[in-house]
Image (cartoon, rainbow, N blue to C red):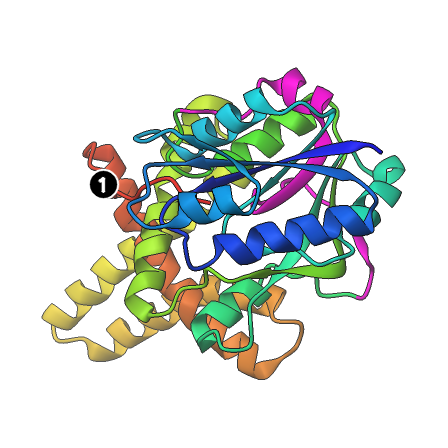
């Protein structure tokens, strides 16, 4: 029986790690694979490490490092030529490994599309749905894959030297860029969906996570140089903040109509992004329009924090 090594970074995920491990074991049994579970913990103060150990995972405690380092430490312990990464709050479907192994000839690095459980609030559900592919095709060649779940042969991981351990966030985009430069075919599969149980339960949590996620832009630009893909969203964000300033100036000069026109112009990039991702669903379009508008401003704030060498503190977690 073949072996697959599954690396799971974790920080304070006692609520989810049991479900994640049991689902991974079920997927391995269905694919008739032996399953090596490696949980790399970032110094949790809950019962997550104990639960993982009781469910048969090898638990490694590595506090105080970034998410890429957690994944790399786990990969260093892995003994299989098949290497999978899943986050500690992701429930993989039972056909995950069966499906992915069948598709190996069509892609080198494979990931499943994500969905949220039904009880997720509207903003978490809408934000997750934006990344789902709009058409009915089950397979999509993509430029990057989020690291919530990945499957590849070990040789691809070694070829690019694993994850960048200096990145606080954006390590998945950096990893994908280097894989593509090395010739790997990245394949997103939506025949079957993984469930993201670590959805944001409050509006404040969503904003906090997005501010943290947007903190990687300057690091990625330093690592890969300027490109349209990496510059596009920061440029839109700077433009949004500039229009905010112009609208404020117009208001202070007693020109409310001009201020309103400027604010309407500012909302166009968010509207265009939402229309591209909402699959002609009017309700989802409105939800994403609001969320993208907030995200544009959060990106500007994250850029300013980075330029001032301030960081949004958040433990590395899967």
Q: Nearer the viewer, residue 260 or 154?
A: 154
- Which of the 4 quarters of the picture holds residue 258? bottom left
Position of residue 241 measured from the top left corner of the image (x, y, whole percent): 28, 55
- Rendered residue at 29%/76% (across/down): 260
- Which of the 4 quarters of the picture holds residue 293? bottom left
Magenta residue check for 151: yes
Q: Is residue 295 above or below residue 77?
A: below
- Rendered residue at 83%/41% (across/down): 101
Q: Residue furthest bottom?
A: 283
244 vs 265, left or right, is: left
- Rendered residue at 48%/57% (across/down): 16
Magenta residue check for 300: no
Position of residue 43 measured from the top left corner of the image (x, y, whole percent): 32, 37
Q: Residues within 10 Å of mark 1 (few under 14, many from 20)?
A: some
Q: Nearer the viewer, residue 233 or 265?
A: 233
**Image quarter (top left, top right, bottom left or bottom right) of the N terminus:** top right
Q: Secondary structure at mark 1?
A: helix
Q: Is residue 18 visible?
A: yes
Q: Is residue 10 above or below residue 179?
A: below
Position of residue 20 measured from the top left corner of the image (x, y, whole percent): 57, 53
* Residue corresponding to mark 1: 305
Q: Nearer the viewer, residue 306 or 150?
A: 150
Q: Is residue 262 above or below residue 151?
A: below
Q: Is residue 248 above or below residue 60?
A: below
Q: Residue furthest front?
A: 54
Total labels drawn: 1
269 vs 131, left or right, is: left
Give the residues drawn in magenta, as a range.
136-165
Q: Is residue 89 visible?
A: no
Position of residue 91 measured from the top left corner of the image (x, y, whole percent): 60, 57
- Rendered residue at 10%/69% (across/down): 252
């Amino acid at each position: 029986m073949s072996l697959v090594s599954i690396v799971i970074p974790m920080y304070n995920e006692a609520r989810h790690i049991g479900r994640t491990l049991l689902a991974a074991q079920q997927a391995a049994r269905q694919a008739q694979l032996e399953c090596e579970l490696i949980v790399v913990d970032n110094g949790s103060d809950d019962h997550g490490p104990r639960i993982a150990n009781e469910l048969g995972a090898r638990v490694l405690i590595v506090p105080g490092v970034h998410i890429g380092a957690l994944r790399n430490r786990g990969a260093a312990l892995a003994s299989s030529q098949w290497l999978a990464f899943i986050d500690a709050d992701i429930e993989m479907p039972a056909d995950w490994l069966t499906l992915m192994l069948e598709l190996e000839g069509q892609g080198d690095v494979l990931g499943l599309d994500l969905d949220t459980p039904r009880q997720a609030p509207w903003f978490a559900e809408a934000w997750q749905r934006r990344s789902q592919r709009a058409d009915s095709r089950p397979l999509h060649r993509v430029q990057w894959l989020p690291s919530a779940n990945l499957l590849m042969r070990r040789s691809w991981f070694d070829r690019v030297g694993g994850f960048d351990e200096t990145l606080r966030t954006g390590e998945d985009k950096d990893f994908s860029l280097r894989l593509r430069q090395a010739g790997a075919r990245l394949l997103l599969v939506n025949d079957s969906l993984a469930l993201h149980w670590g959805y944001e339960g409050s509006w404040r949590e969503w904003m906090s996570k997005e501010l943290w996620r947007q903190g990687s832009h300057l690091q990625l630009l330093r690592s890969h140089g300027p490109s349209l893909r990496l510059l596009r969203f920061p440029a839109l964000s700077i433009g949004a903040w500039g229009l905010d300033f112009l609208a404020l100036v117009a208001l202070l000069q007693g020109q409310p109509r001009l201020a309103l026109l400027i604010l309407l112009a500012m909302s166009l990039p968010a509207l265009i992004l939402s229309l591209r991702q909402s699959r002609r669903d009017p309700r989802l379009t409105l939800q994403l329009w609001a969320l993208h508008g907030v995200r544009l401003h959060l990106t500007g704030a994250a850029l300013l924090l980075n330029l001032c060498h301030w960081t949004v503190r958040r433990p590395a977690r899967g």
